[in-house]
Image (cartoon, helix red, strand yellow):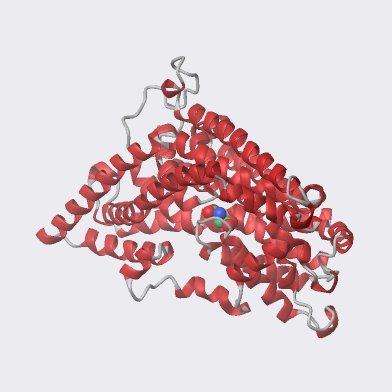
Amino acid sequence: MADTPVNPTNDKPVGAMPWRWPLHWQILLGLIIGATIGLGIGAWAIDQVNQLPVNDKPPPELAGIKAAEFATTSYAYLFFDLIGDLFLQGLKLIIVPLVTTSIVLAVANLVGGRATDGGGSPTGFGRLAGKTMGYYAATSIISVVIGLLVVNALAPGVATNDAGQRVGILEGQDLTAFAGDQADVDKKVGGKQATDFLDVFREMVPPNVIEAAAQGKLLGLIVVSILIGYFLGRSGTEPARAVKALTQGIYDLTLTITDFVLKLAPIGIIGLIAATFGEQYAKLVPDGRLQVFVTGLTTFAGGALLALAVHFFIVMPLILLFVARVNPIRHYRAMLPALMTAFSTASSSATLPVTMECVEDRATVSKKTTSFVLPLGATVNMDGTALYECVAAIFICQAFGVELTFAQQFLIVVTAVLTSIGVAGVPSASLVAIVVILTAVQDALPADALPDGVLLVSGMGLLFVFDRPLDMVRTAVNVFSDSVGAVVIAKTEGEAGVLTG
Ligand code: ASP
């Protein structure tokens, strides 16, 4: 990656002008500017709705949707959305070459080994892979259990049940208040079946690797890259060495492009946040959605945020302190740019280049570890997502007045962990997994648990209201857990320099 700075986690501005500040301060400034612009766009859009002639005024429950329409068709929104999209696409364009080349090289070096890499045997690779998967499985299970405890203790769905009935959300599955969202739900999640979580395993072996790359199906690509790396590492032939050198060349080039794209992150983040805040503010404020939002904040969203906070601020630092034996504060600081990018993009895949840069340059973990652990983690390790899936599924059951048995809650825990492995690192990806979980739960419920014809999935409209803000937070948690995994594995592999820079 970029040259290692003398003091990689130094967070003091080094010049008066923002472009001379360290990256995370620049990104923070971008976040603040973007949020201010976004709130301005949202307020303008609400004003437009208020000024409509009486005959054109939408009914109060649809005012938010109308305001969002004004916001998202305004020139200001379109401009900032374009800037944000260009940045996002810049990050996305790096992902496939970065993930494939870094994993191929990491595995080939681990298996074939160069003394300087500290690798050298299939056992070395097996050990690293085993530790990585062990860490990912353990933290995912811990996070889901935290979600389970919090959602049972707070029972947010019970409160929302009343609020929901008052605004006619759940009664007779009347989702008028969220009519616009409901269409989105159907578009995104329609036609799912309980057994769809098996797709997680199906996608591990892509029949066509080019198609998997084109569709950004990283899980399959990772498996193929591990296979290629493994056999490349074991083969000592001249052509194999040439393939490895070519892969190294593409990898180095990708890193140079990453550095370039990262310099543009603060501007890209202004665009992303301005567009997101503009749309969300316009959508939530006018028609009482803010009230539902606030009710939700104190109940469901509050519960989800609390559980995410426990994982982020208690479990992760404890692991850093007692397993990796590093100072958690240093690690939080090292990861700031990645955390803010995850928050702004709501995509752990798009954040991967920044995560790799932060873990390698700022947390000083070796290339050998980061290039295997992080691409894998961005795809399969999603603690925040697994936790959220569990909280959301149980919340919807509570809102429908369904009492879950221990076995049914256990089913939710298992499906949340499994689906979080297969969920793509893109915005709102967990919604699809939640549909799969709810369908599995519905199948497991006795016939009289719900009134005839009522589907748990129809409660998804509730989640849509605050999906984006929660997505931003859970993505940051996903990314942070990957980075902690890299530090833990580096330390247990005997890397001395981690977070000492
Ligand atoms: N947006 C999340 C991520 O990219 C996935 C999700 O929970 O929707 O990590």
Report the quarter where the N terminus lies. Answer: top left
Residue 401: x percent and y percent? 86, 69
Where, quadrant-wise, is the C terminus in this rendering?
top left
Instruction: Residue 125 in the image: state x and y as whole percent.
Output: 35, 56
Tell me what residue is drawn at x 27 percent, y 52 percent. 109
Res. 323 visible in picture = no
Query: Residue drawn at (71%, 59%), measured in percent from left and top?
Result: 463
Judged from this view, the residue extending furthest toward the left is 238
Residue 382 picture location, percent across and down:
55, 55
Q: In terms of depth relative to the viewer, which is nearer, 149 or 235?
A: 149
Ligand 1 shows up in the quarter that is bottom right
Q: Is 355 on the left-hand or right-hand side of 109?
A: right
Name the outermost residue toward the top: 16
- Taking the spot 63% from the left edge, 72% from the top edge, the residue there is 436
Q: Between residue 290 and residue 477, name the one nearer to us.
A: 290
Judge by depth and name the residue closer to the eye, 109 or 200.
200
Q: Position of residue 302 (x, y in %)?
A: 76, 48
Numbered disc total: 0
**Is residue 337 rendered to the left or right of residue 419?**
left
Is residue 499 shown above or below 281?
above
Answer with the quarter of the image where residue 100 lies: bottom left
Residue at 62%, 63% in the rendered image: 431
Residue 481 visible from this viewpoint: yes
